[in-house]
Amino acid sequence: MTAARPTPVRVFAPLAKSPLLNRLDAEHTDLAVLLAKTADPEPATVRALLSITAMPVADRVARALDDRADLPLTSLALLAAHRPDAKRATGTLRGRLFPDSAAPGTCHTFARTVAALAHQPASVDDAYLSGERFRESAAAADPAVLGELLAPLLDADTLSDPAETGLIALLDARASHAPTAQVDLAATAALTRARRHRVRAGLIARREQTVRDLAHHTAGLTLAAELWFDAMTTAADTPAQASQALAMTEDAADTVASGGDLGCAWPAVRSRWQQVTAARTTRTHPSGWEEAWQAAEATDDGARWDDTQRALVTGYDLLAEHVRTTWRSADVPPTPDECWAADPTGRMLLHIVADHLTGHQTHSPLPHYDDRLLIAFVHGLAKNRRDSIPADLHVTGLIAAIKAARSKAALLARAVPADLGIVVPMRAETQRLTRVLNGDNALAAKVAQLGWLLAAHPDARADLLLVDESTDCASARAAAHTIQTNHPQIRVTITARPDDGSAKGGAVLWGLAELAGAGRTILAYTDLDLTYPLDQLGLHIAALDQPTVGAVVGSRRRPDSHGYYPPAGPAPTALLYQRAVRDLLQLDTTDPQAGFKAFPVAALRAALPLVTDQSLAFDSDLLAAIRRSNYTVAEVGIAALHQYVEGQRGTPRDYDAMLNAVHRQALHHGLDPDLRRTPTWDRIRHAGSLAAAAAERPTTTLLMPSTPR
């Protein structure tokens, strides 16, 4: 039996796109005329047929279309507009426009003019538009049919000059003889929209020049100016407002130079203008950037960097030179937190680089590359340069500047200013609160980092709450004695809350509840040491702006993180702990213990009553409560200012005790591990401890293929 052949698939293109209508030759003339007589008379097909200009076929096609009695209204208008000699089409249009053929104003010329106004406005006779005959016909025409015929104009965003002239004449004529109808309202809206579009086009054309002019007064930083210009363009809803906005753009550079006020009443625009003026008043950039920018024009072999790469190379050179000239001895290099946080000069230089990476004459790499690629570029640059810099401090500094730039750009782009509450727990922190040689104490450094970030949004505010839970309250006294801040956007509060039963968790949870009760909308916590730079908090805020996100972890372990662990990654015990937390609490996070987290106030209010753990393992309890409250947990990669030293121990942690606490948390949140598959937790329990489980050699079972009998 012969198999049936498959039916060939036929693909039908729209007739208007037929090659016949696009590449007409003499032998196809008769077929084109036949199409004009018999094809579906939809407007696209009629428009394609009327685009044939070769004579005599164009005349034959037009006559064939004019002979048809089934053309819809839009197709009739197309034919009458392109071929005013089409008598039947014009007569039919006149009959539709004037149902009472004996009424005054009935006119073939008016029908042709309306068709031309919709499809060929340049051909309209201006003298006819100004005559009394046109006014009489406009008043007598059926407004519904008139609106249907003029739909291409009434729905357009822009109008040509002839089209605008014709619509104005039509409105004037009808206003003097006919009551207002829907077509009149639509025509008025179309004219308003077209005028606004024309003025806004002039405004948009001014954008590049205005941003360039403002850059001269903001040390080349352009992102704030771009956001201000975009806010103004959005706010200008009427032609008068667009004209006002255009005038402001022309005066903007002189206004910011003089420290004056634009006098704009639009709130969003005023807020963005404050960011522009803040960029001017806070940026006292040294000439070093410009010199480094010029020097970074090309590579050693003469190849040119593109501008986004050049910005990174400039930052690399500046930070590397700072380390070379400040710490000449490789034997006693500073730690990254000393170099780029506690040292005011290093911190300022890092922020200068970050500012230029957000937008230096629009040469920012941030919109073009993600942080993982930027970090890879920095490592590749350092490898090619082979610079002898103590502890690769310049690499850590530049990556921290990239993160700070991304953070500030996110805060700049945010429409709503951030209202932050940040908890810093303290216990035996007196040493960190004592001013160090050639540097700031930890609290002063954190305030400086946060102040630099908040300068991106002058309306942003932050409450920094330090909670001392040690019984001697020594840290609170040291903080009160050393704090010297009068920052307009930051309020520092120091609280002594002795609690022997807490190990950091009690101080953090109490502080978060206090700040939530005070009305702060974004809550965060971090440690007093300088591992986590507060200038990167904008990364968390941007992630919190995503729907359903109830917590953001500043992770040290993501592919786009840097600075905490050796190249081989975290220790086996740390990895096992992370996997066990994932098993027990179903938290898919790379760094559950990171001391740099942020939350929206709504999620925190829902979660805090569910948290019971105040030990060092409280982080995972809080994250589990966030998940239990139907929110998601997100992570952002951060650049930690931490120098890993082989064999050096940080804060003493009993990971087995912490893991037992996590097990209790799982039971508390209804996640009994005995009812689920928890392979890492089972492995640790079987080994007796995290260290024992980490020391075990993994076993692999080989499955041999079965031998056929």
Image: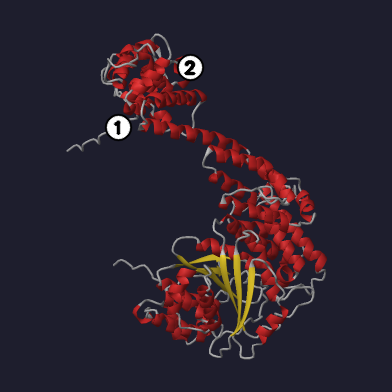
Three-letter residue code for mark 2:
Asp
Residue 517, percent across and down? 50, 74
Would you call the spot at circle 1 few (<14 residues within 10 Å), some (14-19), or many (20 or more)?
few
Residue at which label 1 appears? 10
Residue 647, percent across and down? 66, 80
Q: Is the residue under label 2 in contact with that under label 1 (CB below 8 Å)? A: no
Front position in the image: 235 or 26: 235
Question: Is residue 356 in view?
Answer: no
Three-letter residue code for mark 1:
Arg
**269 on left or right of 24:** right
Q: Can you say whether 473 is above or below 709 in the image?
A: below
Residue 199, percent across and down? 56, 35
Question: Is residue 507 in view?
Answer: yes
Q: In which quarter of the image is residue 313?
A: bottom right
Residue at which label 2 appears? 126
- Image quadrant for the N terminus? top left
